[in-house]
Amino acid sequence: MKMKLMILTMVCCATVIFTGCINTVDGRVRAGVPMKKDTILGNYPRTVPQVFEAAKVVLARMGTLNAENTINKSLSASVDLHGVFVKVTAEEGNTSTVAVQVRNRYGGANIDMAAQIEKEIALELITPR
């Protein structure tokens, strides 16, 4: 009985130590494993509305678009049971920066999917319409 209690205590302590809160790129707080790289940045010589529309098209094609905030130009989506957060910001001149953050449903980072989504947004921008 003492061994089971000690194992239960160790599991509870490990859970508290290895989980926490993360900040998403759109300014919200979510439960997750901190101190993991989960965000990819991309710079494009396009306007913010062009990059924002390309990001919406890519997220709708790859998964389900959950929320769209047109004030701060951020998107939230679900792709393959992962939470995807995208934010587009204006830089100097006619340049825009897109930040893509991906977390799985347990709070772990998925940097490979973030890189893939960022690449898909770049390809959507150069595809003629």
Image (tube, rainbow, N blue to C red):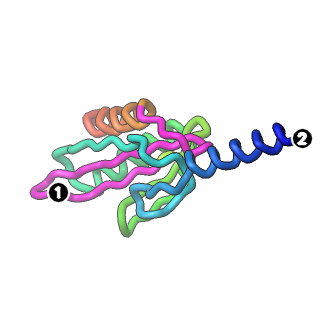
Task: Name the residue beneath numbered marker 2.
Answer: 1
- The region drawn magenta spans 85-111
Q: Nearer the viewer, residue 51 or 10?
A: 10
Q: Are marks 2 and 1 in contact (CB under 8 Å)?
A: no
The mark lying in front, picked from 2 and 1, is: 2
Q: Amino acid at mark 2?
A: Met
Q: Residues within 10 Å of mark 2 (few under 14, many from 20)?
A: few
Q: x%, y% of residue 110?
A: 47, 35
SS at mark 2 in the image: loop
Decide: is 54 above or below 23: above
Q: Nearer the viewer, residue 64 or 80?
A: 80
Decide: is 80 above or below 83: above
Q: Quadrant of the N terminus?
A: top right
Q: x%, y% of residue 87?
A: 36, 54
Q: Nearer the viewer, residue 127 or 11?
A: 11
Task: Name the residue beneath numbered marker 1.
Answer: 91
Q: x%, y% of residue 85?
A: 45, 50
Q: x%, y% of residue 11?
A: 70, 42
Q: Which residue is pictured at 35% across the width and 45% down the height?
A: 54
Q: Is residue 45 left or right of residue 30?
A: left
Q: Which residue is pictured at 34% across the width and 52% down the height?
A: 52
